[in-house]
């Protein structure tokens, strides 16, 4: 049975948590393949709003197993908080949540290194969530990292000490003023590790291989978005993992020829949190309206998200790099009330009109060229079927499908599980 993928196609925050939660009933296993607690996947159901950071978004469906893959980085302290927040749901976590032994650990000093690195960059800072993601992936590729499986060894504390000491020396090297009490942070870390060790650790690539052989349906859940991919995103203003489809192969141990549907999620407009280029960003009332109506604040950091028109040049690029087979459009309801909508269909770049994403998309290099479309006044949030859609929304969807050459299978009209319309 092929493994389906679900990915964000913009700069994250597209609504992956909601869609995974909606789709979970069709799957036996939900597997997160990259990123860490920099992600904030928000789920709303039965009047409850819940944000997950590392735990896969299938956790509320009792029949689904949830796998944290080898490509994920785990902060035991944040993980413990996530587990504490789930206690009221009385889930059998030990049975339904499985963690790869090859997933890397975020140490307290990784978070400090993140802070030191950002502080040293001044105006050029990435706008990191400061969760230690970059330094942890650096240790992974530098072959210094600690993994979940190390916690099963009797000498894990020695390994920890050697790495943390090295990090302290690196923090000094940055020569920035970072205040911290490492003893306190380490006490929290060790207490959280003891709790983590109560959970089920697995050789996840073998587990997923056998599950596939048994015909189990697996959905790989991505975090962040394609434009934050370490290779294909707006480097250096990116995260430190492969957020695109290839990341699911390396982050779970699934062979490329085993990938089935690639479900790409995008918002009907665009947002970005943190620094970096954003060609269609709005600095006017329209952008302010999108942010207010769309409640565009980071689920992890609470930072206001930058807002702008949908960028089809960037979206086509993401569809291409991921091999997207079906699309899901989120937050169409937020655009209700705009008389006119704009969609960037090309860029002016070095005096020429181009339709592909070039190397430099900073404001001084590209100017978006927009197609203007009619907006709709109707409130979409109470709608439950496609037949209720206003004409202008149908035209907007039809235009995007024609340009992207991929069908839009789901239109989300609100944050709740029930506000999901299948086409
Ligand atoms: P980091 O991965 O926390 O270091 O952040 C690097 C960049 O990715 C920053 O611009 C963050 O704002 C952005 N970022 C990281 N995770 C997310 C996410 O889940 N949603 C949106 N942006 C994110």
Image (tube, rainbow, N blue to C red):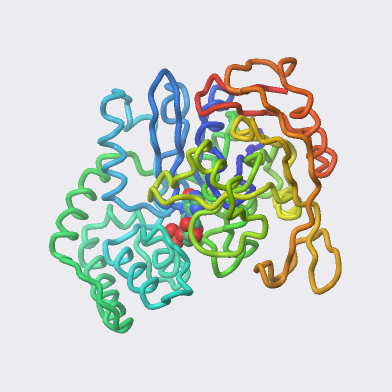
236, 198: nearer the viewer: 236
The image shows residue 147 at horizontal and vertical percentages of 36, 58
Q: In the image, what residue occupies the spot 39% across and 48% down?
A: 302
Q: How many marks?
A: 0
- Residue 71 seen in render: no
The image shows residue 336 at horizontal and vertical percentages of 64, 30
Q: Quadrant where the C terminus lies? A: top right
Give the left or right position of residue 410, taking residue 78 as reference: right
Q: In the image, what residue occupies the spot 38% across and 78% down?
A: 120
Give the left or right position of residue 32, taking residue 388 as reference: left
Q: Quadrant where the N terminus lies? A: top right
The image shows residue 66 at horizontal and vertical percentages of 45, 35
Q: Is residue 206 above or below residue 398?
A: below
Q: In the image, what residue occupies the spot 74% across and 45% down?
A: 342
Give the left or right position of residue 120, taking residue 282 as reference: left
173, 374: nearer the viewer: 374
The image shows residue 340 at horizontal and vertical percentages of 73, 39
Give the left or right position of residue 257, taking residue 248 as reference: right
Q: Is residue 177 above or below residue 408?
A: below
Q: In the image, what residue occupies the spot 58% across and 55% down?
A: 283
346, 225: nearer the viewer: 346
Residue 83 found in image quarter: top left
- Residue 379 seen in render: yes
69, 179: nearer the viewer: 179
Q: Is residue 1 above or below residue 301?
A: above
């Amino acid at each position: 049975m092929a493994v389906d993928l679900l990915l964000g196609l913009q700069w994250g925050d597209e609504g992956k948590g909601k869609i995974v939660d909606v789709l979970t009933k069709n799957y036996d296993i939900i597997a997160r393949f990259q990123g860490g607690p920099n992600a904030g996947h928000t789920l709303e159901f039965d009047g409850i709003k819940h944000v997950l950071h590392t735990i896969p978004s299938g956790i509320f469906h009792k029949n689904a197993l949830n796998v944290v893959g080898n490509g994920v980085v785990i902060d035991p302290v944040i993980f413990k908080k996530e587990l504490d927040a789930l206690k009221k749901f009385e889930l059998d976590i030990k049975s339904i949540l499985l963690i790869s032994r090859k997933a890397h650990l975020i140490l307290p000093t990784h978070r400090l290194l993140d802070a030191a690195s950002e502080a040293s960059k001044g105006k050029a800072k990435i706008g990191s969530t400061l969760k230690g993601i970059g330094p942890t992936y650096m240790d992974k590729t530098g072959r210094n990292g600690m993994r979940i499986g190390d916690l099963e060894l009797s000498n894990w504390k020695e390994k920890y000490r050697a790495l943390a000491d090295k990090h302290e020396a690196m923090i000094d090297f940055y020569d920035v003023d970072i205040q911290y009490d490492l003893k306190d942070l380490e006490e929290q870390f060790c207490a959280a590790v003891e709790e983590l060790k109560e959970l089920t650790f697995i050789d996840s690539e073998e587990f997923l291989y056998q599950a596939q052989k048994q015909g189990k349906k697996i959905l790989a859940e991505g975090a962040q978005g394609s434009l934050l991919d370490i290779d294909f995103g707006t480097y250096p203003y990116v995260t430190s993992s492969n957020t695109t489809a290839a990341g699911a192969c390396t982050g779970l141990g699934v062979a490329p020829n085993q990938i089935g549907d690639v479900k790409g999620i995008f918002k009907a407009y665009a947002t970005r949190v943190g620094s970096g280029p954003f060609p269609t960003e709005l600095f006017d009332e329209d952008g302010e309206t999108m942010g207010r109506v769309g409640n565009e604040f980071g689920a992890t950091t609470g930072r206001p998200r930058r807002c702008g028109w949908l960028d089809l040049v960037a979206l086509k690029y993401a569809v291409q790099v991921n091999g997207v087979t079906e699309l899901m459009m989120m937050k169409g309801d937020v655009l209700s009330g705009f008389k006119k909508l704009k969609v960037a269909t090309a860029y002016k770049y070095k005096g020429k009109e181009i339709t592909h994403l070039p190397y430099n998309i900073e404001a001084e290099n590209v100017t978006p060229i927009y197609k203007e479309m009619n907006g709709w006044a109707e409130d979409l949030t109470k709608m439950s079927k496609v037949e209720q859609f206003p004409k202008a929304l149908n035209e907007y969807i039809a235009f995007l499908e024609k340009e992207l050459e991929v069908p839009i299978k789901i239109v989300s009209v609100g944050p709740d599980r029930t506000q999901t319309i299948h086409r």
